[in-house]
């Protein structure tokens, strides 16, 4: 089925509509192509985010190691002391 007008107008409503269609087993009514694109995009975004956060972590560890063990003030992480705000990333590893 081609992308619905709702996708372009109200993404959140479109996503909820598609989730309901999938849960009800109405695959012929679902916008499968757009759903697949969104899943691929989400995976790429999460991968970029993980690489970015690992890079920052590695840089902080290298600075700590080679700049005499400088650490952030008590109760503050290195990323908070540099003005960055981070959210936890949950990794699920499937066998």
Image: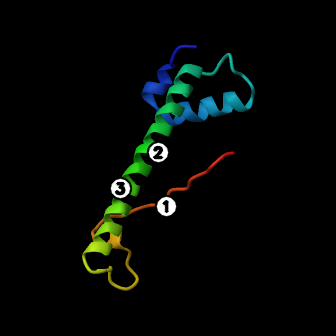
The residue that label 1 is drawn on is: 88
Nearer to me, 38 or 24: 38
Q: Nearer the viewer, mark 2 or mark 3?
A: 3
Nearer to me, 60 or 9: 60
Q: What label does residue 55 carry, if any?
A: 3
Is label 2 in a helix, a strand or a loop?
A: helix
The x, y position of residue 82, in whole percent, is: 27, 69
First in sequence, mark 2 or 3: give its number.
2
First in sequence, mark 3 or 1: give its number.
3
Q: Residue furthest bottom?
A: 74
Q: Residue furthest top?
A: 1
Q: What label does residue 46 carry, if any?
A: 2
Circle 1 packing at 10 Å, graded few (<14), some (14-19), many (20+), is few
Q: Is residue 61 above or below residue 31?
A: below
The x, y position of residue 71, in whole percent, is: 32, 80
Q: Residue furthest right?
A: 25
Judged left or right of residue 30, residue 83 is left
Is label 3 in a helix, a strand or a loop?
A: helix
Label 2, label 3: how many angstroms apart (C-alpha)?
A: 14 Å
Is label 1 in a helix, a strand or a loop?
A: loop
Query: Based on the displayed image, in which of its 4 quarters is residue 55 positioned?
Result: bottom left
């Amino acid at each position: 089925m081609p992308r619905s007008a709702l996708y372009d107008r109200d993404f959140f409503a479109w996503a909820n509509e598609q989730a309901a269609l999938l849960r009800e087993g109405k695959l012929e009514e679902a916008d499968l192509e757009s759903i697949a694109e969104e899943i691929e995009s989400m995976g790429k975004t999460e991968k970029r985010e993980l690489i970015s956060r690992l890079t920052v972590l590695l840089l902080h560890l290298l600075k700590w190691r080679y700049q005499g063990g400088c650490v952030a003030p008590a109760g503050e992480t290195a990323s908070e002391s540099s003005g960055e705000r981070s959210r936890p990333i949950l990794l699920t590893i499937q066998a």
